[in-house]
Image (cartoon, helix red, strand yellow):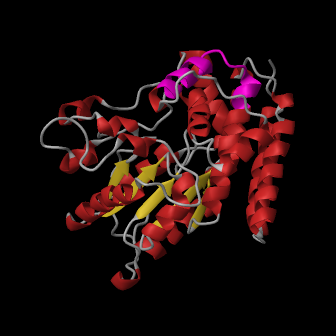
Amino acid sequence: MDASTTQTDQQSTPVPQEKRLRGIFLHTGWRSGGTWLWSRFRALESVSALYEPLGELLGELSVADIPSIRPDYTSGHPSMRSPYYEEYRPFMRKAGRGVNGYRKNFGIDRFGDIPGDDFSALCAYLKDLCDISAENGKVPVLKFCRSQGRTPWLKRAFPNVMHMGLLRNPAAQFASGWMLRQEWRNPFFVAAPFRVLGLNQSEPIVRQAIATCGVKLPRVETASDEAYTAACAHYAQTVEGVEAYRAFVALWIVSAWRMLNDVDLLLDADRLGQSPAYAAGLRSEFQAATGVAPDFSAARNLVDEATRNAQRMSEIDGRLLRSINFLAQKFLLAQMEASGSSQSPIAEIVRQKLLLADEISGQWRY
């Protein structure tokens, strides 16, 4: 699939301007299919599609760097006519490196009930991205991998934006990152859950997820974020598959709980490539809410891919993961009970994802 193929918006039925939401925030996770989803918005002429606005790379990015940052053949990302960060050119600092308003601490998701001290700066930064895009006649579409924990905060701070959550079953999502470690010695996606959980373990909800799922975090002698990040990267190179999955699912379930209560639209990554009718319906929902009509008709069947790739999974016995998935569901039900939530659809959505994860991971053999 070539994500650089340009679509037009002329086929979209206009909606009254006063009823349109003024942008779209795509709340996704690593290896969830979010980059492909973003690419479909990027193909629209009316959109300014900003990739990973909270990613650490933006703190060091220079204009000269932009052309060289493109997908490599190991990423699984769609091909692109333009490099990932092309849309950031108007936002670059005139002197030195970095994007205006970006701070390094934006790069770690947060899960507290109360926004942190840096949240006002984060909102000002995101507002600038949205406002300047709008001033240039474009609908801002921001694709995040570090926002699911902060979705409730962002929903309140940006009520005129459509907040979409992307959910993929955890076994297939985990496998996508695990295979990069085993086949290409890229431990980033194995390390990421340990890093995010560890740097958020002061939050009660994160501690509960760690304890319920039995996560073993790496130990470090210093408390700095940089030291902990380095320790997680080292730990991820040799951690056993089952232990890596524990951390992944703990982050997956706490992120789902934080996100599902507040998104305007939940997009099922597993269903998208299986049902043309579902893909067409999503396009209509985006069009009705924002006037933007992305074409999802070429979505890959991620469930079939995960099933076909089962034989590539090594160093992990998938039969041992069923109990971890059960613990993740137990965590969710405990959160719902503690909050007095009666949103049974959330529990059913997560239950179905975990059942699918059982089915997929049950084929993995050490």
Could you say where residue 107 lies in the image, as x and y percent from the top left?
43, 42
Q: Is residue 312 magenta?
A: no
Q: Residue at x 64, y 65 (%)?
A: 261
Instruction: Return the residue found at the far left.
Output: 95
- Say if 25 sits above or below 357 in the image: below
Could you say where residue 171 lies in the image, as x and y percent from the top left?
72, 37
Relative to 192, 312 lies left or right: right
Instruction: Return the residue found at the far front.
Output: 222
Residue range highlighted in magenta: 227-245
Relative to 273, 333 lies left or right: right
Out of 287 and 314, give the one closest to the viewer. Answer: 314
Q: Residue at x 72, y 28 (%)?
A: 216
Could you say where residue 167 lies in the image, as x and y percent from the top left?
63, 52
Q: Is residue 230 magenta?
A: yes
- Say if 63 sits above or below 48 in the image: above
Q: Residue at x 56, y 17 (%)?
A: 234
Q: Quadrant of residue 290?
A: bottom left
Relative to 92, 22 lies left or right: right
Could you say where residue 294 lies in the image, as x and y percent from the top left?
44, 60
Q: Quadrant of residue 359?
A: top right
- Say if 73 sits above or below 109 in the image: above
